[in-house]
Image (spheres, rainbow, N blue to C red):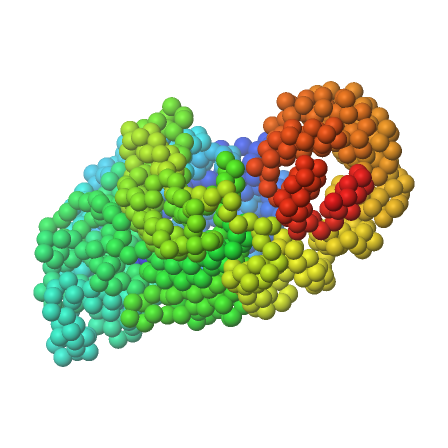
Amino acid sequence: MLWAGCALTVLTTAATARASETPLYQPAPAWIAAAPAAPTGEGSPPVMLVDMQHRIEDGRLWSYARQQTRIATSEMLSQAATLTLPWAPDKGDLIVHDLAILRDGKRIDLLAQGQKFTVLRREESLEQRELTGILTATMAVEGLQVGDVLDLGFSTTERDRALGGRVQDVTPLIAAPARIGAGRVRFSWPTAAAPKWKLLADGVTATPVKNGAYTELTIALPLAKPKEMPDDAPSRYRHPPLIELATFADWADVSRTFASLYASDGLIAPGSALAGEVAAIQTAEATPIGRAQRALEVVQDKIRYLAVGMDGGNYVPQKPARTWDVRYGDCKAKTLLLLAMLKAMGIEAEAVVANVGEGDFVPERLPSAAAFNHVFVRATIDGQSLWLDGTGSNARMADIRDTPPAGYVLPLRAGGATPERIVTRANARPMIDLTIDADESGAVDLPSPLAITATIHGQLASMLRMAKSQLGAEEQRDLLNGMLQQWIGEGQFADVTLTADGPSGDMVVRATGVTTTPWRSEDRRRKRSLTYRYANFGFAPDRSRPEWTGIPVVVPAPTGIHSLLRVKLPEGGRGMTLEGTGDADLRVAGFVVKRTTRLSNGVLTIDERVDSTGGEIPAAQVAAERDAVATMRAQLPQLVAPADTPRRWTLTPAAIEGSGQVKAIRAVFAKAIADDVEEPSGYTSRATFESAIGDRRAALADLTKVIGIQPSVDLYLQRSQVHARLGDPVQALADAERARAIDPASFTAIGQVAQMKAESGDLAGGLALLDQRIALGGESRVPLRRMKATLLGDFGAAAEAVALYDTLIGEKPGSPLLLNGRCWVKGTRAVMLDTALKDCTAAIELSDDTAAALDSRAMVWYRLGRYAEAMTDVDTVLADHPDHASTRYLRAAILKATKRDGEAAGELAIARRLSPTIDREYARYGFKL
C-alpha cells in the first residue's frame, strides 16, 4: 500500500530496476488453488465469482485475482466490455493468465484468438498534484454479448526495496449487502517464514492450515453485513472489513526500517543555495522557536506540492537539494527538507508517520507501513513538542503550537518506537474571524443591514487564494456569496471583495449584506438571538442501541470561529434588556466557548469564540455532555425589546424615509441587483421589503422586472396581491389569471381569482369557478367549499353563507376553523348575533391558536354594543399579533364608539399603513371611520 494521504509518492534520484512495462501472458502458477464453484442458476448475481489469492515469499507479494461476470443487461455490456488493469512497473509485473467468454457451455479463449491489452500511462490523480507512474493495461473485449459470462484471471507482483525485504498486504473483504455468487480470499506463505496477520472484521474467524511446506489461510466471501455504526463513532469502529498481513516484527521494526530514509545529517551542502536560506533564517531569528517557524514557512510557501511516485518513490523521500532545486515535493520531500533545515540550525527534530482520517485506528492494526498515509515533523524546543507539517499552509508564529488531528503517530527512530497519541487542543487562531456591524436602529422587524469583514486563516485561506487566481469574477462572487450565506445566514450581499493580507498569509472577505430580521416574537415581546449558528451547536449522539452504548463520540478536529457582533439599536437602546448568560467560559462536548456581552450607548456588542478541540468523548461522559450542551443552549444570551419598541407599522412615512436602517437596506439591494441584473432573488427580496414598509409601487416595479426574467405562479400571485393593496382589483385579477394559466390546479391561484372576481363585482363568476373546481372532487373539495362560504359571507347573501357553514359543520362537527368562519359571517353581517357568541367561544375553546376566533368574537361584542368585552378580545389578539390590520381597524372602531377619538385616529392610521384597502374592505360590513 502506498502512503497516499499526502500521496507519500515522490521521485527518488536513485535508479530502480524496473519490471516489464507491458503485461506478461503466462499460465497461473501451480500454487493457485481451483476456484470455488460459482452459481449459474436463475437469480444468481451478475458477479458470479471473485477469487483472490496471495502468496508472500522471498520478500515478494504475489496477488492473483479471478472474476467471472455474467453480462445480464446492455448497460452491463457497455461497462464490462472495456477492461482496465493498473499496476506499478517499478514494483513488479502484471501477468494475464486467462481471458475467456463462456457461452452456451463453451469456452471462447480470447487470448488464444490474439486479443491483447494496450498499455496506457493514465495519471488519474494529476488534478490532486500526483504523478503515480501507474500503468494501465486496457482492452475493448471483442465479441462480448448480453448473456455471456466474462472470465478474467490475472496477477500482479510487488517487491518494494524501501521495505528492506519485508512484505505487507491489506485486502478489503467483500461483505453484504454487496452480492457475489461465490468468493474467497486465500493467503499462503512458507511455514518456516510465517508473516503476522490480523483479521479486522466483526464476527469473522479464520484458522491457518498447513499444506506441505506452506501454510494457508482462507476466508469465504461475501461476509455477513457489518454491524451498523453511528456516524460520529471513531474510525476504528467504522472501518470496512479487511485483513492485513506483514512481515514486520512489530511497530519498532516499522520505525527502524524507515528511520534511515529521514536521516538528515549532511544533507545541506555548505555554500549551497539551501545553506544560504538556512543562514538567512538564523540571521533574522534569534530564538529556536522563531527559526523553526520560519523554516516551516519556507517549506510551506516556497515548495509547491507535487508527488511523483515513479521509480521507487512510494516511500523514499526526495533529497533536500533536489527539492530545493525543482521547488516541488510531497509530504516526504517536505518533511526531509524541513528536518535537514532544523538539523542545520541545531534544533532537535524527527519524522513521524500518521494516518490522516483513521489515526485512532492505528494501534489496532497490524504493524506495517500500510497503516500510515502521511509524514511530518515533530520538533522539540524547550521540552515542548511542536508538530510541523510542510504540506500545510499559512503557518505563522501564532500557530506553531497547534496540534494536528492525527490521532496516533509513529516516530521514525533508529532505535525504534511505538505509536504515540497526539493530544489535541484548540488552535491558537480561529480559522474564521468575523466582524459584523448591524444597523437595527429603525425598528425590530425590518431586515438587518450588515457590514461584514471576515479574516480567513489556514487551509481555507489557501483555497481562497487559489480561487482568486483561477476563478472569474462571477465564479468568485458565487463562491463568496455561498460562504457568507453559510456564516451569516440567508440574505443578499453586495460590495463583496477578496483580498490577500501579505504578512499574515490570511485572506480577507469584505461585504455588505441584508438578512431577514433576527428578531422574533416570544411571550408577547420582540427578542433577538445574539449568537450565530456555529455557537448554537447541538450534541445529540445516538447511542440508543445496546451495542452502541460503549462507543465514544468523535469531536471535530481543532478549528475555531471568532465573531465580533455590534448591533445599533432603536431609540438608543431604550428599555432593552439581556436574558440568558451574557458572559461565558465553557468547555462542553469537546468545544471551548468564550463570550462577553455588553450593552452600552445604544449598541449591543457580543464578542464570542467557539473552538472544537478534537479527540473523543468517552461513552460514559456522553449523557453528562448532552446535559451540559442543553444547559448552555438554554442560557444563550438574547436581547429583549420593550413592549412599545418601534415597529415598522408605527413608523411614519417620513420616519421610514429618514431611517438609516432603511437607507442601508436599500443601498445593499441596489448594489446586489447591479452586480447581477439577471438574478431574480434580489428583485423579489427588495419587493417584499418595499411592500412591507408601504412603498408598494416600488415593489410592483421589482416584481414586474423579475417576472420578465423568470415568471412563476408565486410571482404572479405576489404581484396580484400588490395590485389589490393598491386598490386595483382589475390588474390583481389579471395577474391571478396569469398564475392560473401556469397551474390551473393551484389552490392559491383559484382562491385569488375568485376573490378578485368578487371584488370586481363579479361574485357570480367567482362562485362559478369555485363550483367548477368543487365538482371535480379530490382533497381540495373541502377547503374550496370553505372558500365559497367565505366569499358568500363577504360579498353575497349572509343567510346563504351561514347555511353553507351549517352544512360543513354538520359534516365535520367541532371544527374550530368552520365555527370561527360562521361566527365571522354573523358578526360582520350583524345577523344571528345570539348564536354568534356561542360559535366564537366554541372555536376559542377548540383552537390551538385563538387569535382568529378572538378577533371574530370581538366583532360580535362590538355589534352587541359590549365595547369593554370587545376591547379585551382585540387587545389579546394584538398582544400576540400586533400587525393584524383588521384587528387594528376594529379597535379604532371601538375607540371611536367610546368617544376616544384621538386614540382611534392613531389606531386607524396604523391599520391603513398595514393595509391601504382596509377602509374599503370594512365598508362591505357597514363600517365608516
- Tell me the quarter of the image containing the C terminus: top right
| Left or right, residue 748 beside residue 661 | right
Q: Is residue 415 visible?
A: yes
- Residue at the farthest front position: 899
- Image quadrant assignment for residue 407: top left
Q: Is residue 317 visible?
A: no
Asked whether 812 or 5 is in front, the reply is: 812
- Image quadrant assignment for residue 70: top right
Image point (14%, 79%), residue name = 271
| Left or right, residue 889 beside residue 198 | right
Image spot of residue 448 (x, y percent): 50, 55
647 lies above or below 190: below
Asked whether 429 or 331 is in front, the reply is: 429
893 lies above or below 265: above
Image point (21%, 59%), residue name = 400
- Image quadrant assignment for residue 537: top left
Asked whether 641 or 139 is in front, the reply is: 641
Image spot of residue 675 (x, y percent): 57, 68
Asked whether 460 or 26 is in front, the reply is: 460
